[in-house]
Amino acid sequence: MKKQTNRALQAAETKTKLIDAALAVFSRKGFSASTTKDIARQAGVTDGLIYHYFTSKEELLWAVIDRHTLNESLRLITLEIREETGLEEALTYILRSLFRLLDEKEALIAMFFGESHRNPAIQEKLNQLVARGVQLFAGFLKERSTIGEQELYIAIRNMLNALVMYFLIHDRVQDNKNERENYITVTVHQFIKIIS
Amino acid sequence: MKKQTNRALQAAETKTKLIDAALAVFSRKGFSASTTKDIARQAGVTDGLIYHYFTSKEELLWAVIDRHTLNESLRLITLEIREETGLEEALTYILRSLFRLLDEKEALIAMFFGESHRNPAIQEKLNQLVARGVQLFAGFLKERSTIGEQELYIAIRNMLNALVMYFLIHDRVQDNKNERENYITVTVHQFIKIIS
Amino acid sequence: MKKQTNRALQAAETKTKLIDAALAVFSRKGFSASTTKDIARQAGVTDGLIYHYFTSKEELLWAVIDRHTLNESLRLITLEIREETGLEEALTYILRSLFRLLDEKEALIAMFFGESHRNPAIQEKLNQLVARGVQLFAGFLKERSTIGEQELYIAIRNMLNALVMYFLIHDRVQDNKNERENYITVTVHQFIKIIS
Amino acid sequence: MKKQTNRALQAAETKTKLIDAALAVFSRKGFSASTTKDIARQAGVTDGLIYHYFTSKEELLWAVIDRHTLNESLRLITLEIREETGLEEALTYILRSLFRLLDEKEALIAMFFGESHRNPAIQEKLNQLVARGVQLFAGFLKERSTIGEQELYIAIRNMLNALVMYFLIHDRVQDNKNERENYITVTVHQFIKIIS
DNA sequence: CATGAATGAGACTTCATTCAT
DNA sequence: TATGAATGAAGTCTCATTCAT
């Protein structure tokens, strides 16, 4: 019985190792340029083992995506900001948290964008993710803004989109914390102008 | 002399055919999932001919990127708006033009994003492109805005980034012209709020 | 443990099969005219397996060369002749042994010459081989010859070179045992004339 | 008419250029690793032109071999030595001339050996060449030697074989003129020992 | 559960050869 | 005579996947 449990545990660990390895390799090379050998080596297992846990390389991709939904992280950020009071402070805190989240999940985000435009299912995931972020924001901002609901949604979506894009093609390259802080300050200020 | 010209012309045409075909295939499948066979078939030539004009598949990628710089298109848009007067009208016109440009170059844009995060040179190209767009805008808006230069740059960059992101993960999927028009109207309105 | 051994054994056998097959094909067609498909077929495995054991066709060439150094065979011949007494008998025995060695390793020898002049590393191997042969002979002959050491070395080298050349461009073609025996007799006789 | 002649001249020149280029490339890379493109570039013409003068790459190989028979050079050496008197002087002169000939035709010789063992026709050529050399020598030495005709033939063949081998795997590498002179002196001396 | 030898389709690339100009 | 664009077969090598151990 103990043995069984140990085995089950080991199996779960190996699966996790494989998923983590796959994430790392996929985001470094993109899905189709990644080889199962790469992934196995990164996970520290032998080639064939992947097929003990997954039926194909593509299934491994889906496992990666399933594990890292980001939604949970987004919810946590919202939970914390519920208690905040000042609008500017609150927004600054949120943007900082978002950047931190992007930093953490950089590999995943990068892969998402790399594969999304040739994989509709991934694109849909992205869409959902942004929509979820917009909703969380909206819940928090509705009472504090003077503009219409639709306008608010667009304002939020634009801010989030701009931020992710900034992160992807500018911030990652520069790695300059001051510039990022400045970006946050200005963006928050302009966002408040819009919704007030 | 005529002969010479005809032959040279035909060669140039073939090269163009190959670049166009490569663009189509790359943006459909991504660089590494695209095969040279695909490209040759799409161009209507035999496999080996690619290597008469390019030394490798990667060189073909660079040729694709070199041909479609977008910069020229961006400049043309600016030239036209110089004559516009009303700020709202002008901005609306510009955003519409940008969407039209994105529609035209959808394949290229998609590929850019697909490869950029694993190819620094492409990422740099993207950065340059956005920077160029920001400058063109800034030249037009400097006199009509009341905010500081740096704030203006960030506002413009945010708007452009948001627009491209919107196009990539939302607009392309929906294919709903009304929603796009609405997006433009609201975004322009909010942008004016920021810079006034 | 048994399992482990069996598998490892089988892998070693496959590798050997590949090296033997490569030797056969390389010496029949020369290195660059040989195809990996040929080699795989000759070894009775599929194309891809070569690259499970070797990183390239060239590495396979080196494996072939490493396996068949000839040095060991040369040493054995010397060991046996140490006990011989009569000079003529001894030399005759040695030359016969050399011809036998050439017969056995004909494929390898032929390939050596085929690739040597465009591959310095192989040429060096050849040089070493001849030098080793000269030394072995010299050790045996030093006390029985009346000429200077340097002259002895040149005499031996000339005899060996002549013999190999004879084998390569004449003997292999004729396949006439009598002529070979005659060649040995006369050559031994003339060699004794030189060193006495 | 003049035009015609000029054309014919030009054609002959081009053909020569191609043969020379082919010799250079073949001896550097071996026949099958040489590409027609290499040869065309080396000759300074375009790819297709080869097939205006030769029906295949192989035919070009034969043209190379036909042009450089060496026989003529060998004959010239013999002509000159007819007048010589002293045996040692004569032989020294001949060996020096042979080395010079090998130096000149190094590329050709190297190619001969590279292809001979997989191309019987070339091997036959080599055989003929050596046989011709043996005959020329024999004609000169017959009266000056005391040994039987067959022994003389073998002695000559051995000396020539040894010399060519020495050149191919030793002399070319060292590039040491003193060592070569020493080799000639000793070899001549030992040869005289044999035939006297 | 884990290994890694083996498969075979298919990728990129090369190259002898042809042919319209 | 000369060009070089075009062909297509074949080569080296990769890699997802299978399976005996």
Image: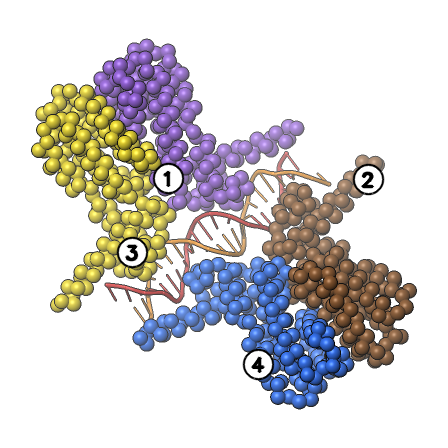
Chain colours: A yellow, B purple, C blue, D brown, E red, F orange
In this view, which residue lies farthest toward the front? Answer: C148
Give the amino acid at mark 2: Thr
Q: Which residue is mark 4?
A: C76
Instruction: Please report, as a chain letter, where disc 2 is located.
Output: D
Tag 2 near tag 3, CB within 8 Å: no
Across and down, in percent, residue D141 comes to 86, 72
Q: Residue at x 36, y 17 (%)?
A: B139
Instruction: Please report, as a chain letter, where disc 1 is located.
Output: B
Q: Could you say which is closer to the camera, residue A59 or residue C66?
A: C66
Q: Residue at x 37, y 48 (%)?
A: A33
Q: Which residue is mark 1?
A: B115
Q: Nearer the viewer, mark 2 or mark 3?
A: 3
Q: Which residue is mark 3?
A: A43
Q: Is residue A81 visible?
A: yes
Q: Could you say which is closer to the camera, residue D92 or residue A31?
A: D92
Which quadrant does the N terminus of chain D fall into?
Answer: top right
Instruction: Please report, as a chain letter, where disc 3 is located.
Output: A
Q: Which residue is mark 2?
A: D5
- Image quarter for residue C14? bottom left
Disc 4 crowd rating (10 Å Cα; few below 14, some 14-19, many 20+) is few
Q: Are marks 3 and 4 on the same chain?
A: no
Q: Residue at x 57, y 59 (%)?
A: C32
- Image quarter for residue A36? bottom left
Q: Nearer the viewer, mark 4 or mark 2?
A: 4
Instruction: Please report, as a chain letter, where disc 4 is located.
Output: C
Which quadrant does the C terminus of chain D fall into?
Answer: bottom right
Q: Are marks 4 and 2 on the same chain?
A: no
Across and down, in percent, residue D187 comes to 76, 71
Q: Is residue C178 rendered to the left or right of residue B133?
A: right
Give the amino acid at mark 1: Glu
Dot 1 falls on a residue whose secondary structure is: helix
Give the amino acid at mark 4: Leu
